[in-house]
Image (spheres, helix red, strand yellow):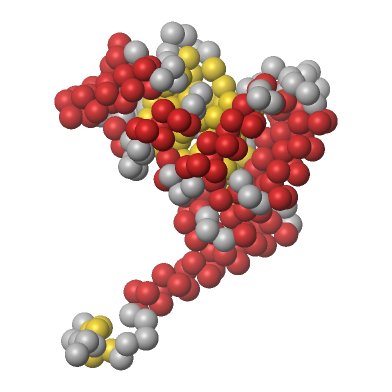
Amino acid sequence: MKRPRRWNDTEVPDGLASPLDAAIRSRDAATMQMVRRAIDSRDVLLAFQPVMQAARPDRPAFYEGLLRVLDPTGRVIPARDFIGAVEETETGRQLDCLALDIGLRTLAEQPWLRLAVNMSARSIGYPPWMRTLNHGLSADPTVGERLILEITESSAMLMPDIVQVFMADLQTRGIAFALDDFGAGYTSFRYLRDFYFDIIKIDGQFIGGIATTPDNQVLTRALISIAQHFDMFTVAEAVERPEDADFLIAAGIDCLQGYLYAAPTVHPHWAKTRALGTG
């Protein structure tokens, strides 16, 4: 006979949520409501963070556009605070569409810019997402060559065969692909070989304090070696200390991204220039 669960020392009939479960559901419901309101009012924006060249750490190789929403008070809310509640829902697909639309319009407005935009593999079969992409590409033929689509390792592994076909199709249109959070999940190296990602972004859990952490040094060197074997460009995420950057550059990393160089901002320098009327 199945034993009833307990809240502290009180037996709880099956089918009833614990106080913690109820609190999590209530929090997620409030988050969903906030995000849906932001979508309806188009209070969705990108925060831009440079990805710096290892050979020239003062020069960006490209920028990443990180999803943000505004809450009812106007506060900027980062994706980590809501993506878990919406990622598997249509709301998550709508956010992917809006992020892509903003990214494409930014690329059209800034012909010098190369920009990475995040997406979930779940959006591959979402018709509005593909319509958004096709509209942006048809409006400006140079956009595809400057667009990078970032897919997280965990998302790519949900449907590897579909992701492979999707990538192969869009790469013929000039679009590059980045595998985000590499090393955080359980990528099959067979799939890594077949994916042909252009860029591998090594997860920040291996990067923080790497200059003094031998285990992370070994793991990161291995990840860089794997990427180099497959002719993939490497980016270290979450770089915050100069000594970590020095180690990564010596280890052969191609690019570095993190607060050591710049925080994500919803007010990038090109927007300020345009506002001043000099761009």
Q: Nearer the viewer, residue 225 or 78?
A: 225
Q: Position of residue 93 (x, y in %)?
A: 62, 53
Say which quadrant the C terminus sits in: top right
Q: Nearer the viewer, residue 227 or 259?
A: 227
Q: Is residue 32 left or right of residue 144?
A: left
Residue at horizontal 74 percent and vertical 57 percent from the top: 41
Occupied quadrant, residue 227: top left
Residue at horizontal 54 percent and vertical 43 percent from the top: 162
Residue at horizontal 65 percent and vertical 43 percent from the top: 99
Q: Nearer the viewer, residue 185 or 51?
A: 185
Say which quadrant the N terminus sits in: bottom left
Eyeballing the image, is 248 above or below 264? above
Q: Position of residue 278 (x, y in %)?
A: 78, 18
Q: Position of residue 242 (x, y in %)?
A: 33, 19
Residue 228 showing in the rendered view: yes
Q: Nearer the viewer, residue 261 or 28?
A: 28
Eyeballing the image, is 99 above or below 253? below
Occupied quadrant, residue 67: top right
Residue at horizontal 46 percent and vertical 49 percent from the top: 158
Residue extending furthest top? 55
**For the image shown, how many numbered marks are present on the structure?**
0
Q: Is residue 131 left or right of residue 181?
A: right
Q: Position of residue 63 (x, y in %)?
A: 57, 26
Q: Is residue 255 left or right of residue 12?
A: right
Occupied quadrant, residue 62: top right
Residue 258 showing in the rendered view: no
